[in-house]
Image (cartoon, rainbow, N blue to C red):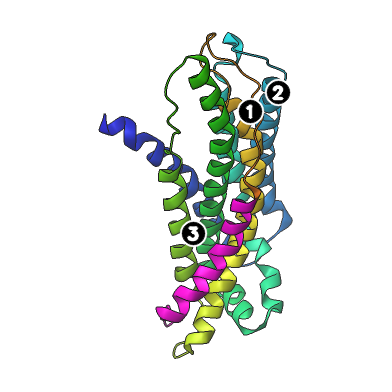
């Protein structure tokens, strides 16, 4: 029982860890050549293509279909490949930070240390937002199934056990990025600014990735599990909550940085 409960967390941790490790490997090279991004691009596009194909197939379904039974695990594999493939792009995407004042220069100047943490913020945000969208897609389907079977409706809250830890990981990674980039003896406001900027950069990329993956995962995960349950229940993406997460992570990061500033480490 414990193994079944921990398996999804271990799988999510493996996916996030792979994305962060790839970002760290690219960042350690110092100079970013376009050729080094091609493998990540191919992996990300492969995952995106798989999710798109499955989403298109399930969108045409009007009920349970044996052929679509593997749709949700297959689309989850596509989402994993998509997120892993985005890892190498994080160090490259941090280049423009150098133009955003001292905080940006510090983050971009030590990209070999900060890129893995920003990648972790991106991955955590993507997982949180993707889970929110999928949960909102599954919720009306579960409600309709309960009414059809004349059972009491109890919404599943399992997605919170993924989304909340993922958000906390994103904040912790932003704190670590600020701690590894600033000069020793920097002021509290400067430390908080670096933390907020790292969180903003990572959450912006993660919000886009999470919205794309969550939207493509919604239909496959909302498929009924047997013939006795109706399908084609519409849903609305939680755009307000998504915006709150996208904006809230950097805001909370700045607040944490002011209350408990990361202490920059000596090179």
Q: Which mark is residue 79?
A: none
Q: Are marks 2 and 1 in contact (CB under 8 Å)?
A: yes
Q: Which residue is at 57% across, 30% downward? A: 140
Label 2, secondary structure: give it. Answer: helix
**Pointer 2 residue:** 59
Q: Where residue 211 sits: x, y (%)?
A: 65, 45
Label 1, secondary structure: give it. Answer: helix
Part of the protein shown in magenta:
240-267
Which one is closest to the eye, mark 1 or mark 3? 1
Ranked by sequence position, the earlier of labels 2 and 3 is 2
Closer-to-camera residue (182/246):
246
Q: Where residue 267 sits: x, y (%)?
A: 45, 81
**Pointer 1 residue:** 219
Instruction: Examine the image and state in which quarter residue 152 appears.
Output: top left
Ranked by sequence position, the earlier of labels 1 and 3 is 3
Instruction: Examine the image and state in which quarter residue 222 appears.
Output: top right
Q: Is residue 260 magenta?
A: yes
Q: Horizontal placement of 40 versus 264: left or right?
A: right
Numbered label tally: 3
Closer-to-camera residue (113/79):
79
**Pointer 3 residue:** 170
| 3D distance between C-alphas at marks 2 and 3 | 32 Å
Which one is closest to the eye, mark 2 or mark 3? 2
Can the viewer see residue 10?
yes
Q: Quadrant of the N terminus?
A: top left
The 10 Å Cα crowd at callout 3, few under 14, some 14 to 19, many 20 or more, is many
Closer-to-camera residue (240/20):
240
């Amino acid at each position: 029982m414990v193994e079944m409960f921990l398996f999804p967390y271990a799988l999510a941790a493996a996916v996030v860890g792979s994305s962060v490790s790839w970002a760290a490997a690219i960042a350690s090279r110092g100079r970013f050549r376009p050729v080094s991004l091609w493998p990540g691009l191919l992996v990300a596009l492969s995952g995106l293509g798989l999710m798109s194909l499955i989403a298109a197939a399930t969108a045409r379904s009007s009920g349970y279909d044996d052929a679509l039974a593997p749709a949700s695990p297959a689309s989850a594999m596509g989402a994993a490949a998509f997120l892993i493939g985005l890892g190498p792009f994080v160090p490259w995407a941090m280049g423009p930070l150098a133009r955003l004042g001292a905080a940006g220069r510090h983050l971009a100047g030590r990209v070999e240390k900060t890129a893995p943490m920003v990648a972790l913020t991106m991955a955590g945000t993507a997982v949180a937002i993707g889970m929110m969208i999928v949960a909102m897609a599954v919720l009306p389907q579960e409600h309709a199934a309960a009414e059809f079977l004349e059972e009491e409706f109890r919404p599943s809250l399992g997605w919170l056990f993924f989304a909340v830890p993922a958000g906390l990981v994103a904040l912790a990674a932003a704190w670590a990025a600020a701690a590894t980039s600033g000069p020793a003896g920097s002021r509290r406001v400067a430390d908080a600014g670096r933390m907020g900027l790292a969180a903003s950069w990572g959450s912006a990329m993660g919000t886009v990735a999470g919205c794309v993956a969550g939207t493509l995962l919604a239909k496959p995960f909302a498929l009924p599990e047997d013939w006795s349950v109706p399908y084609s229940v519409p849903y609305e993406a939680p755009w307000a909550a998504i915006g709150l997460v996208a904006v809230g992570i950097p805001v909370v990061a700045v607040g944490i940085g002011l209350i408990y500033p990361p202490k920059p480490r000596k090179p």
